[in-house]
Amino acid sequence: MTFRRVLLLVMLSLLPVWVAATEVRASLDRDKVALGETVTLNLRVEGGGMFDAPDLSALNKDFTVLGTSNNTSISIINGKRSAQLVYGVALRPNRVGTLTIPSLTFANGSTQALTLEVTPADDRAVANGRKDVYLEASLDPREAWVGEQVVYTVRLYLASPLANGSLDEPRVQGVELSKISDDLNYQQEKGGRRYNVIERRYALIPQKAGKLEIPPIAFSGELVEMADPDSFFGSTRAASAISQPVTLDVKAVPAEAGKTAWLPARELTLSLDGADARGALHVGQTLNLTMTVQATGLPYEALPSLSLPSIDGATVYPDKPVNGTRVIDSWLQGRRQQGFAVVPSRAGKLDIPATTLTWFNVRTGQSEVARIAPVTLDVLPATGTPAPAAPQDLPAPNVTAPAATTSSPSRQALVAGGIVLLLVGGAVGFALSRRRSQVVAAPAPTPRAPSIPSGSRGLRASFIAAARGSDPKAQYESLLAWARHERPGIQTLGDVEAQLASAEQGACIGLLQRSRYAPMAERIAGDRLAAAFRDGFQWKDSGPRETGGALAPLYPFKTD
């Protein structure tokens, strides 16, 4: 046979075949396997050709289809050409028993039905080291409360190097599931055989009570056969494994726990730092406190938001919270941290009430209370508070100097002149009549709009300049100095805010204090701050008064 003729036959064999195949047969590479092992279904078409892939949906009842392949072989013997197409389907049984592979339509023909015997996984083979690959799944603990974290661990044992493979992710209804860190890789000896182990851990948090079954996890891949004498680098062979299902008993929330937030944890702490600050605390000074709650076995999202209780005689400015979850020895550790700036508004005792948080200890099965003890601090008057103004002399009588006088006489001269006039009786009447005529003749003052007192103008200018800057401390101090000049009894900007009639000025003071005491808070725009006080303070009344205040507390959890 010439080369040209052989080449023509090969090319013809590659063309699609649009007529019915002469024969279609189905076979299994094994008729008995253990659960977790794979089996290959081969569909053979005599005569070869190219055909559409068969519909394999009928296999989904009892099998998992892992992949497909096809191979065409052509042979010419004694001038006679023959071809065969083999379509392979890799299957993994889903249950133990006698499983049926139904008839499939392929290459314009139908295959015969087949049966496969699936036995339970051979644990003795694993223990004796006779299996090249197998999977284990476990739970810690095997019994848990609703909302309690459980560690679900999957271990893949490989006796040969892994060329490639995939490990299914667990799919469980009614739980929160998240992978913990990266996979672990180590070696372990079982049945006198050394295995490479790939360990994967998950944090599993059940959301409802009852018996929870976690389905098996499957692995499929290829192992390297380094002992193959026909391969220089080592050939590969298909391998698969499946784990046993595991069951978790989930207990309901205790009835007595319904009165508080449900926090099932292995450990929980609640603390408040900064309350034991050294040195004297003065009115208007900032006391920085940091509250922290940390729980082992809970993510931070499950923990309540933090707040201080209402503090009489102080204003509380919360800072931006810092939250997060980390993993410590396979256990989630959630943490919430909240900073507070506490600004006393009056001297005396400052009482910070106790804060409590009830949680459930899953290791002891008992409710416990985390507690922050109450704190009492001494608050001294504000530093730099001006002393009360000394009484001043009474104002001079409302008199007008004679028109002919070229210089204004002093008060003492006027008094002496009055005595002289009283001694001269006739001159008194004349002087009084002359003074009355001068007072009547004096022109009435022209009405004008109220203006900022002249002594405050310099302080106002300093504040306006600071307001247009970016230093909250300078803005705070310059505004307070200006207000104290006009009302000496004022000690803090909280006092200023309480005595203002302007809602805009009060709002600006609130934002200014937050930007100073809570660095992460939103800062007020300088133009807005300067515009609000451009025309001076808009006081409610004419007299100063002391006030104090506190933000309304936000309690995310119940206290005892």
Image (cartoon, rainbow, N blue to C red):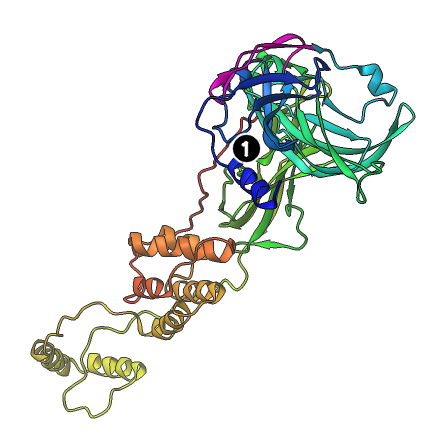
Disc 1 residue type?
A: Pro
Local crowd size for mark 1, using a 10 Å CA cut-off: few (<14), some (14–19), many (≥20): some
Q: Is residue 46 left or right of residue 509?
A: right
**Is the C terminus in the top left, top right, bottom left or bottom right quadrant?**
top right
Q: Which quarter of the figure has residue 535?
A: bottom left
Q: Is residue 337 visible?
A: no
| Residue 493: image location, x then y, percent | 43, 56
Q: Is residue 377 visible?
A: yes
| Residue 374: image location, x then y, percent | 62, 36
Q: Which quarter of the figure has residue 92?
A: top right
Q: Which residues are magenta?
A: 94-117
Q: Which quarter of the figure has residue 41?
A: top right
Camera-nearest residue between 205 and 235 = 235
| 15 lies above or below 495 | above
User: Quick check: is 305 in the magenta stretch?
Assistant: no
Which residue position is annotated with label 1?
304
SS at badge 1: loop
**Is the N terminus in the top left, top right, bottom left or bottom right quadrant?**
top right
Camera-nearest residue between 26 and 487 = 26
